[in-house]
Amino acid sequence: MPAPTTWLDVAADDPFGPATLPYGVFSSSDGRPPRVGVAIGAWVLDLGAAARELDAPFADAVDAPALNPLLAAGPATWREVRETLTAWLADPAYEGALRPHLADRARVRLHLPFAVGDYVDFYSSEHHATNLGRILRPNQEPLTPNWKHLPIGYHGRSGTVVVSGTEIVRPMGQRKPPSAAEPDFGPSARLDIEAEVGFVVGSPAPLGTPVPVADFAEHVFGVFLVNDWSARDLQAWETVPLGPFLGKSFATSVSPWVVPLSALEAARVEPPARGPEPLPYLRDADGQPWGLDLRLEVRLNGHTVARPPFAAMYWTPAQQLAHLTVNGASLRTGDIYASGTVSGPGAGEQGSLIELSWNGAEPLELPDGSTRTFLRDGDTVSITASAPGAGGATIGFGEVAGRVLPAEG
Amino acid sequence: MPAPTTWLDVAADDPFGPATLPYGVFSSSDGRPPRVGVAIGAWVLDLGAAARELDAPFADAVDAPALNPLLAAGPATWREVRETLTAWLADPAYEGALRPHLADRARVRLHLPFAVGDYVDFYSSEHHATNLGRILRPNQEPLTPNWKHLPIGYHGRSGTVVVSGTEIVRPMGQRKPPSAAEPDFGPSARLDIEAEVGFVVGSPAPLGTPVPVADFAEHVFGVFLVNDWSARDLQAWETVPLGPFLGKSFATSVSPWVVPLSALEAARVEPPARGPEPLPYLRDADGQPWGLDLRLEVRLNGHTVARPPFAAMYWTPAQQLAHLTVNGASLRTGDIYASGTVSGPGAGEQGSLIELSWNGAEPLELPDGSTRTFLRDGDTVSITASAPGAGGATIGFGEVAGRVLPAEG
């Protein structure tokens, strides 16, 4: 498929060129409430206003304060909206109608793009899980016996999913170092990041109807970036026997732009070889793998500290969705799930500081001469990603960023 | 406080007498959409219609298809609504206005009473946690080292919270008995119940504002019953290292009636002695304990199999809420949390079949001559509860019930 073109002045290698067309929710200084927008080059198109102006049949689904109505509209509408947008931006005949609905992307405020239903966090990088196993359980097999049989996951707190740019207050909580007799209470001393990739459900599935691997793209609308902030000391003390809770629930940041799955056809790759062979409900659909060649980049105070490769993930998002629903659990529009920390096999490919600093034993050196094991107050973390798009285009995802504020209380 | 009275024909010991006044959402055969109702004796009062008719200032909060607007209105409105209802039902002058808005409770359909935000499940019965530890980890200390320092909890799936009466399809999933080399896939063979008590948040709390133990009743509106259906075999295989997931996420049933906290003043009791002393943020507010003397009853196919005493819970709901928010996690209207399985120290006081049958070693005998370890297809489980109310009244909670259907697929 050749790269789409546009009458707008957008560089061929712009990550938000006409091959990307991600959806978000924005507001500007005009006082109007937040509304759905599409990023193109340096602009954001007010999609609802444009659809009204051009009498698009999908106007009701996109003239909204969140992506949820578009998500709920289902894959036929998703295709129609994207094809229409592509045509509008390619054909100069639409320039007059659309120009008034373009805002300067540098001057808009971006909001949480969807109302979140449930939030599930997986743990699907073999490299990450192995590293964590080696660090946290050094005398045991690094992977638990179930790890290669199912995508391990758990539910997170959907009410504390926040949009990129939201400041992250260092959480308070109970910590108990192995050497201490009793826990004490105070700010997390081991605040970490987890660079992940998120997926948002559009079409719901009723209770009792598992979604097979092959139906992934019928239900999942698109992809975004996630920073699953993690207080390692709170988590370590609370996590046995029921898993992470307060160590994760204080905040999960997401990028404001959702890249539709249909922008990622050229990024689909075979996942790594898996063995033992997964049970039938988890097998890749024939010839239709959902490995994705997203290259993530993690910056700490502007300095690149990691380049995690999403293509190295053991379980694909299609397998994750099939697993999530195989017990009959329903899906709602706005349910999201995240991949788990993305870590590759190579040096500097790890998506968390606990891995990059090997639990603090090997501090990172930053260009300003300082070192890091875990995050300091004032640190800013930004995660970006790119992927191959149609006709050699680059697909961008924007960024998910957040600055750490001191603990309160 | 004396028991309130009413001009309606309600027996003094009716669990839904005028001391209870629980809120729910109902519909009837008149074709009108679901709306907020209050149970009183054999009737349900259409609260929105009554409030409109009598020009009550809170009409907007209760003329709604779910409890959420009332929950969001906050404690001053909660008090006003209850005081007004109590006055209406006590004074025969209101009979003419209210009679037309009373429906036969036996003929209405009850719906999920609230739109659920997040769902957290705790694990706060020492007896339950000790029993599970002995059963599942026989060679270790039954309680993990953190258990008496914090209320262990995790997030469940809010999208699969269903109202009492919803049929429960036996979930499919991966099971691996210890003797098997590999997991297989099939229907859960160890489907269990967990009899719990739930709490629903009314007033929200923004990110970064922990809710102290003393502020519990400013945020929590009321109490309901929960059956946290659990597939023990799925759960056992998946749960290490990140906790329960598919073993729980297929369904969580809740009772349709929410009993306001203000109906439970006479049920407040001192919780059991706790030691080691909890950290300051978890200490009971002076003289204001939130132990609650709810007596649960679990019936299997109509036969009482357990009478779990909620007063025996180690951590109170006020402590649970303080813990849940101490890291700065926000609360939304409609967030719910459950106590964890309620089990007492005595015989027949356990709220789960894995305890009652000691992991299958001691099958329960039912009056029809059959035995149970875990649930069979066709089994119906019902959980009810009562508590002391004002002036010697009995506070009822209705029931949460569900029937098990065979696995599909």
Image (tube, coloured by chain):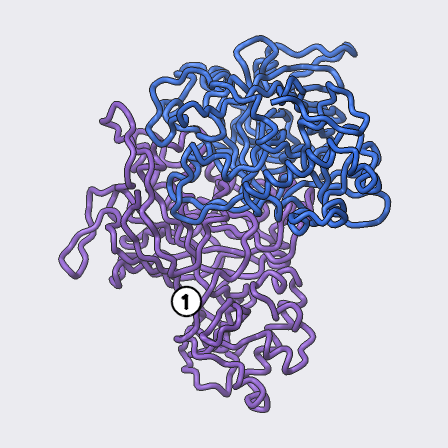
Chain colours: A purple, B blue
Q: Which residue is mark 1?
A: A398
Q: Residue A360: give x, y in percent of width and height.
A: 22, 43
Image height of A154 relative to B236, above or below: below
Q: Residue B177: give x, y in percent of width and height.
A: 55, 24
Q: Nearer the viewer, residue B244 or A176?
A: A176
Position of residue A27 in the picture relative to residue B85 (left or right): left
Q: Residue at x 33, y 44 (%)?
A: A171
Q: Residue furthest left?
A: A369
Image height of A266 relative to B18, above or below: below
Position of residue B44 in the picture relative to residue B229 (left or right): right
Quick check: can you spot residue B108?
yes
Specify the amino acid type for callout 1: Gly
Q: Residue at x 64, y 67 (%)?
A: A61
Q: Residue B406: give x, y in percent of width and height.
A: 74, 31
Q: Is disc 1 surrounded by few (<14), some (14 to 19) or many (20+) residues within 10 Å?
A: many
Position of residue A327 in the picture relative to residue A185 (left or right): right
Q: Residue at x 54, y 61 (%)?
A: A222
Q: Residue B80: give x, y in percent of width and height.
A: 61, 40
Callout 1: chain: A
Quick check: can you spot residue A311?
no
Image height of A295 relative to B228, above or below: below
SS at circle 1 = strand
Query: Which image quarter: residue A163?
Result: bottom left
Q: Residue at x 50, y 22 (%)?
A: B291
Q: Quadrant of the C terminus of chain B?
A: top right
Q: Residue furthest front?
A: B93
